Amino acid sequence: MITIDQYNFQGKRALVRVDFNVPLNSNFEITDDTRIRAAVPTIRKILNDGGSVVLMSHLGRPKGGPEEKYSLKHLLKPLEETFQLPIQFAPDCIGSEAVEMANNLQPGQILLVENLRFHKEEEQGNQIFAEKLSLLGEVYVNDAFGTAHRAHASTAIVADYFPHDKVCGSVMQAELENAQRVLSYADRPYTAIMGGAKISDKIQVIEQLLDRVDNLIIGGGMSYTFAKAQGGTIGNSLLEEDKQSFTLELLKKAEEKGVKIYLPSDTVIADAFDNNANTQVVTSGTIPDGWMGLDIGPDTIATFSEVVRTSKTILWNGPMGVFEFENFATGTKAIAEAVVEATKNGAYSLIGGGDSAAAVTQMGHSHDVSYVSTGGGALLEYMEGKQLPGVLALQMEETPLT
Ligand code: 3PG
């Protein structure tokens, strides 16, 4: 694989696949620009070498045609501010206008093209569409780790048109190196913290982790399915009915493998899904009807934090509660503090997944942990041991990935 530092972009027009799938508010303002900031080194390297840049990305999940709220033109101003440069915008990612704008780029200039997913062929991995995209550049750079698990035209297929000039961007490289770090040579004790709403998204990764970690902490929405499966009452809390048997099997497997599982011992419950709902703290598995668990309780925070603080490798994916509501963010904040403390004491910490990464960033801790991944699903799939199409496509025949 050619890394960004190994390639000289002088006089070259680079077609760069970035993951600018960033959250926007109702005024189309970016609420978390982590993915944009992450792409800066790759783009700067190309410009500093004397190349020009054509940026392509998806935004959201449009239904295969243009939708105002998903237009990449909303990112134009923030990008101009980031690079302190005027940036051109092509209203379609393929076609004669985009090709002409790309051909006219001078070294040091940037062109942003419209949302790739305004064409259904992008997600279909259509070859003709990929060929049209390929006309925009002379060298292809993939820096979109967050989308590397998708075999889409711009993430995988387009690379075929650049057999000798396909380059791994710096975000992609850093993400792979950090994920490898927790996959292959973790210092012990190694603790994985899994949270978030759904177990179904994380079944495979959890199963893989049982072969690696010493401690598995389970919090957030997914913990209520465990509580129910163990015979508890969970009121109106999140439940994945059909995953109850999986949770029991998982507990059994963990015991067989000597992995210690930590589930919440108490929970903060609310009488409505609302920041200002009435609350109580109850023992896990004793939630009355009409109430729902929205955060881990104080005893759980104490136990989880102690495990985290004494760990040497930490992988965290998914919040401990509904942290978007200030009144139910305590558990997630406490875990973030414990991760920061462990990191200060020499632990390696990888924060992955949109929500836990957003929580750490919102708390101003993104520089106090070892690495904050830009990938959600992509990181999980990589941790599951799957080969990511976007990574495979960068492989050079003569230098296979190990
Ligand atoms: C993400 O946000 O995880 C990536 O940008 C991929 O988006 P997708 O799940 O819509 O493919």
Image (tube, helix red, strand yellow):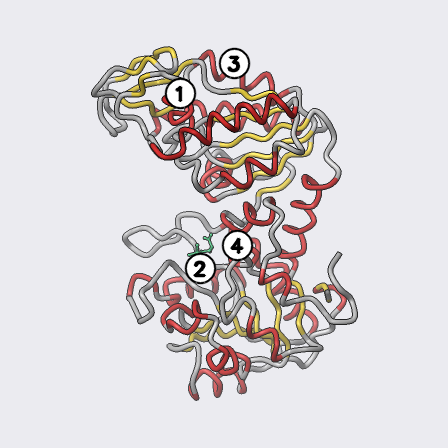
Q: Regarding mark 3 in the picture, which secondary structure is present there?
A: helix
Position in image of residue 345 (x %, y %): 70, 24
For mark 4, does the 10 Å Cα neighbourhood hold few (<14), some (14 to 19), or many (20 or more) residues? many
Which residue is under mark 2?
78
Which residue is under mark 3?
302
Q: Which mark is residue 146?
A: 4
Q: Regarding mark 1 in the picture, which secondary structure is present there?
A: helix
For mark 3, does the 10 Å Cα neighbourhood hold few (<14), some (14 to 19), or many (20 or more) residues? some
Residues under labels 4 and 1: Cα distance? 32 Å
Position in image of residue 181 (x %, y %): 71, 42
Which residue is under mark 1?
227
Q: Please tell me which residue lies in front, 26 or 169.
A: 169
- Which quadrant, please, contains the C terminus? bottom right
Q: Tags 4 and 1 in contact by the CB under 8 Å rule?
A: no
Residues under labels 3 and 4: Cα distance? 33 Å
Above or below, 214 against 30 in this view is above
Q: Tags 2 and 1 in contact by the CB under 8 Å rule?
A: no
Position in image of residue 314 (x %, y %): 63, 31
Whether the residue carrying mark 4 lies under 8 Å from ligand 1 is answered with: yes
Q: Decide which of tag 3 and tag 4 comes sooner along the chain.
A: 4
**The quadrant where residue 27 appears:** bottom left
Q: Please tell me which residue lies in front, 155 or 374.
A: 155
Q: Please tell me which residue lies in front, 231 or 200.
A: 231
Q: Tags 3 and 4 in contact by the CB under 8 Å rule?
A: no
Whether the residue carrying mark 2 lies under 8 Å from ligand 1 is answered with: no
Mark 3: amino acid: Ala
